Amino acid sequence: MRKLTFPETRRGFTLIELLVVIAIIATLIALLLPAVQQAREAARRSQCKNNLKQLGIALHNYHDTHSAFPAGYFSYATSTGSGPAWANIDPDTWDAAPGWSWSSMLLPYLDQAPVYNALEVNRACWDSSHAAIVQTKLPVFLCPSTSGSDEPFLVRDEPGAPLVIGGSQIRFGRSHYVASHGQESCWGECGAVPTGIIFTNIYTKTTTTVTINGDASRVADGPFFRNSRTKMRDVTDGTSNTIFLGEHSSKLSDKTWVGVVPGAFTHPQFSSPENGSDAAATLCLVHAGPSGGELDITGFPIVHPINFPTFHVGQMYSEHTGGGHVCMGDGSVRFVSENIDLLLFAELSSINEGEVIGEF
């Protein structure tokens, strides 16, 4: 008897089945990608927090060694706007050599002694002898979440052209971290302008006119300013209640770990109604506001906490979702919401105004 045979059938996907499988895979990838991005941002945010923690520890080690925190930046002190030629005094702001910032003074406490030892701190930070070393990229000063550049940048003058001193342009290493000048700012108005208006009370909006004569301490109410020498005992509001350092993304403006250059200006990278250029001190310092008796259109003192939509070069700015990190005077690092109460942020920015601060 002949055995019946049947043709072999081949198993495979139909076109519809293949399309269904592809759609399922695409859906799974779409669900997975946000989780991957969140995990990456969490890691970047953790690294940024660690950077600020290292800076906070370095500040305390510097204080232990020198019995004071470093100056916001070091400048030849003058009460008249005059001085030796080597000081290169800016006729408007009275900023002068050597210009080294708070962050450059922390290098020995950040495992960067070779970089610090290569600096001649008695000479100007923009001196040609420092041209190579001041362009060093230091990871501890760079936030990995920042979408702006982490490369050295050209220091610019007021119109925005490269600043030239002694026939040379100046290029500095970048920082994504800045020090707090307090509520009040004291940049251009702490030079040739002999007097200034400061807020005596941010709640009643009362102001006082003070004689400055180049002395930023008569205006500044924060821990860091030109030639500051703040001690622990000066922070009577409490070191755990006072912001010392914070973030500033290079997406908004250029900041440096090196120092301040007379005649320099910081320029915004994008436009908004309030973010014009500002004087050289904003290369390493920011303030919270209010400043100079400034009021908004409602009569409220102008305060700009981290990520506030004025987007000014003199404020803190972070690319973390919802806010940014700050380092308090006790060395702790806190994440501050960009929706923080305005007056609370101002209270956290001063060292000795006597405000009562609750939870934040």
Image: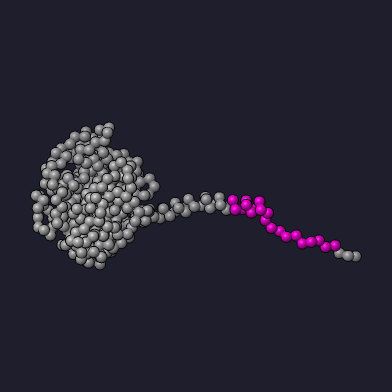
Q: Position of residue 351 (x, y in %)?
A: 21, 45
Q: Position of residue 174 (x, y in %)?
A: 29, 57
Q: Nearer the viewer, residue 209 or 151?
A: 151
Q: Quadrant of the C terminus?
A: top left
Residue plotted at (22% across, 56% down): 163
Image check: 97 left or right of 12?
A: left
Magenta residue check for 273 = no
Q: Nearer the viewer, residue 192 or 175?
A: 192
Where residue 85 sits, quadrant-wise, is bottom left
Residue plotted at (9% across, 49% down): 80
Report if residue 232 is visible in the image.
Answer: no
Where residue 199 sits, quadrant-wise, is top left
Q: Is residue 204 above or below residue 99?
A: above
Q: Quadrant of the N terminus?
A: bottom right
Report if residue 201 is visible in the image.
Answer: yes
Residue range (magenta): 4-23
Image check: 327 left or right of 68?
A: right
Residue at the extreme right of the image, as rendered: 1
Q: Position of residue 18 (x, y in %)?
A: 64, 54
Q: Nearer the viewer, residue 75 or 270?
A: 270
Residue plotted at (33% across, 47% down): 270
**Colour scheme in use:** one colour
Image check: 33 left or right of 273?
A: right
